[in-house]
Amino acid sequence: MQPGPRNLITDIEGLIVGNASAPRLRSGVSVLTADRPFTAAVHVMGGAPGTRETDLLAPDKLVQEVDALVLSGGSAFGLDAASGVMDGLRARGRGFAVGDMRVPIVPGAILFDLLNGGDKDWDQNPYAPLGRAALEAATRDFTLGSQGAGYGAMTGNLKGGLGSASAVLDSGLTVGALVAVNALGSATVGAGRQFWAAPHEQGAEFGGMGLEGAFSAGLWDPGAEPLPVKRRGEATTIAIVATDARLTQAEAQRMAVAAHDGMARALLPSHTPYDGDLVFAVATGQKPLTDPALDPFRLGHAAASVLARAIARGVYHARPEPGDVMPCWQSLFG
């Protein structure tokens, strides 16, 4: 498999992503949507998730498709970003039909960025307007790093950020990932510049450093027992993996489960009691499975691979700004 032409989740035909950032707040919102509803599922492995409307994504629930997915900063306050997205979609006539009413279906997830140095002394929750702005900005081309939901994100030792990557399989199916990296753990090996995701890198998408030195220069002790660098409750990496394959909600959920392997490959440690690590899965249904037994297997592998790459790209592209409480990769190693 090779990256798509953009190396973004929007290499999947029909998907668009919008970002809205608030520099003073040091936070933001990212929205994934499409011109028509799409199948979605979710899987949570972190111990401290914050979510909205995720129960309806179970395969046995009435609603089988959604209109958008939201990734937001702001901890529980950020869940209101989905309200702004709902308002924007309703104005477009989108939503689940109930009589003569339409209710946009907009699940979302949040990360904690309330202690990153931004001004959080607001009188009115700012996340609904940010959600609406992110929806209105949605396009196929978008910038990585300090953008949207990744704007104020941090890892255990470096600034986090918004990442994305894609892969086109030999079967012709495309898989992509979008992630806001705000982990308790680290995306890099020890105090060095090498990414844990290095074995999965395509080209030089996050530096092209290869594998030399990362695991042989004393940067990593395989017997080390890591301690949390952040305070409890300050973490969470939230992601979306997507494909143009035609999947049921149950099959999409299995892809989300497999994608968590990519999170574990790119962040050490991951899925801790203090992270709310979560993966949404999206299937646009444009292409049928050519092999119902083999294709889901390959989609799961590809989802894990693109998510690992997207995580490294999010940290790699983060940019320095005044008032940062953590350094960014580019400042130290770029």
Image (tube, helix red, strand yellow):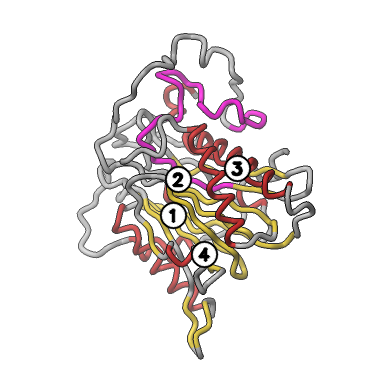
Query: Are discs 2 and 3 less than 8 Å apart at CB?
Result: no
Residue where numbered disc 1 is placed: 71
The one of 135 and 97 positioned closer to us in this rendering: 97
User: Disc 1 residue type?
Assistant: Leu
User: Disc 3 residue type?
Assistant: Ala
* In the rendered image, the vertical position of residue 25 relative to residue 200, given as above or below: below
Residue 197 belongs to magenta span? yes
Residue 73 belongs to magenta span? no
Query: Are discs 2 and 1 less than 8 Å apart at CB?
Result: yes
- Per the rendered image, the range of residues in magenta is 177-205
Q: Position of residue 234 (x, y in %)?
A: 29, 42
The crowd level at tag 4 (other Cα within 10 Å; few <14, some 14-19, many 20+) is many
User: Disc 4 residue type?
Assistant: Ala
Q: Earlier in the sequence, mark 4 or mark 3?
A: 4
* In the rendered image, the vertical position of residue 229 relative to residue 15, given as above or below: above
Report helix, strand or loop for mark 4.
strand
Report helix, strand or loop for mark 2.
strand
The crowd level at tag 2 (other Cα within 10 Å; few <14, some 14-19, many 20+) is many
Residue where numbered disc 2 is placed: 180
Mark count: 4
Calculate the distance from the C-alpha at mark 2 to the C-alpha at mark 3: 12 Å
Q: Earlier in the sequence, mark 2 or mark 4?
A: 4
In the picture, the quarter occupied by the N terminus is top right
Residue under the point 37% across and 46% down: 276
Residue where numbered disc 4 is placed: 68
Q: Position of residue 2 (x, y in %)?
A: 72, 38
Residue where numbered disc 3 is placed: 165
